[in-house]
Amino acid sequence: MGNTYNGNLTFNVAGSGGLYTSYSVKSNITGNYTVNRTAAGLLDLLGTGVTIGGNFSCTKNVGGATLMGLLTQPSTIGGSININVTQNPGDAFRMYRIKNSGAGGSITVTNCQAPNIQQDSLVLNSFSINNYHSGAFAYFYDNNIQEISVPIRIKLSEVDMPVILEVIRLQVMLILPTKALEEESLMMQMQVAVAIHSLAM
């Protein structure tokens, strides 16, 4: 049986230890769920799924991997989702099977290994990944991003290897800087059920 939190839940992490939430059982939070990390270390959130009645917010401007969700268990958010993460170039960033219903949120990630974004259903105003430093593949697979007020802008910069993308029901602008001409960008407009496989720099 998981934990139930009536009202808002906030974690302010100022130590170096990893924070694991909903690690082995699902949690239910009736209000808003907020995580602020000010000391370097791992964030492993929504580990076995979570139900959030309000908004979800995660802010981290220090090193350490950021892992959210599990492919075998959904996490649902009744309100908006706001993620603002700045970490070290070698740190992982992952979002699995997260669904939110409230508009107005944004996701911004600066510095990470190859991002792994799978099976998410998100209502957002913007989605940006800046300074992807890995030679591995970046995965955006089986995601649904809808009801947005402006076209979602997914930005991957400093990409050293091909990228695999699959976008469903999403109009998206993809910007991939070329290796030879860092000032130029490759821009594409993709619509329903567009897949890009092995896009070379």
Image (cartoon, rainbow, N blue to C red):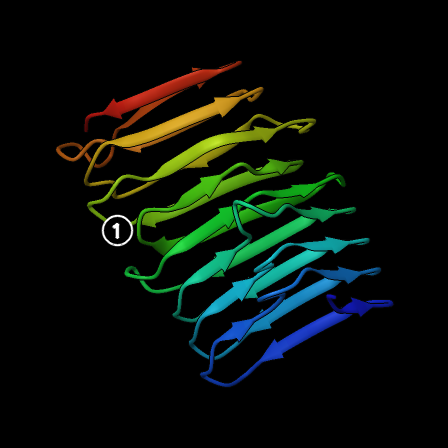
Q: Is residue 103 left or right of residue 121?
A: right
Residue annotated with mark 1: 133
Task: Residue 32: give x, y in percent of width and height.
Answer: 78, 60
Task: Tell me if 59 is positioned left or right of 181 in this view.
Answer: right
Q: Identify the residue at horizontal 47%, vertical 76% (top origin).
A: 18
The image quarter in which residue 179 lies: top left
In this rendering, is residue 114 above or below 29? above
Name the residue nearer the viewer: 154 or 6: 6
Q: At which x and y percent is residue 177?
A: 26, 33
Mark 1 Cα within 10 Å, few/some/many (few <14, many 20+)? many
Q: How many marks?
A: 1
| Residue found 55% across the figure and 53% down from its top | 69
Q: Residue 21's quadrant in the figure?
A: bottom right
| SS for dot 1 | loop
Residue displayed at 57% across by 38% down: 120
- Image point (55%, 45%), residue name: 72
Seen from the viewer's position, the closer of residues 105 and 47 is: 47
In the picture, measured across the screen, residue 188 lies left or right of residue 33, that is left
Q: Left or right: where does residue 27 sit relative to residue 178?
A: right
Nearest the viewer among 60 and 100 is 100
Image quarter where the C terminus lies is: top left
Q: Position of residue 113 (x, y in %)?
A: 31, 53
Q: Position of residue 82 (x, y in %)?
A: 63, 52
**Can you name the residue that lies furthest to the right here?**
6
Q: Residue furthest front?
A: 1
Q: Quadrant of the N terminus?
A: bottom right
What amino acid is labelled 1 in the image?
A: His
Residue 160 sits above or below residue 64 on the image: above
Q: Residue furthest left?
A: 180
Rendered position, 124 above or below 5: above
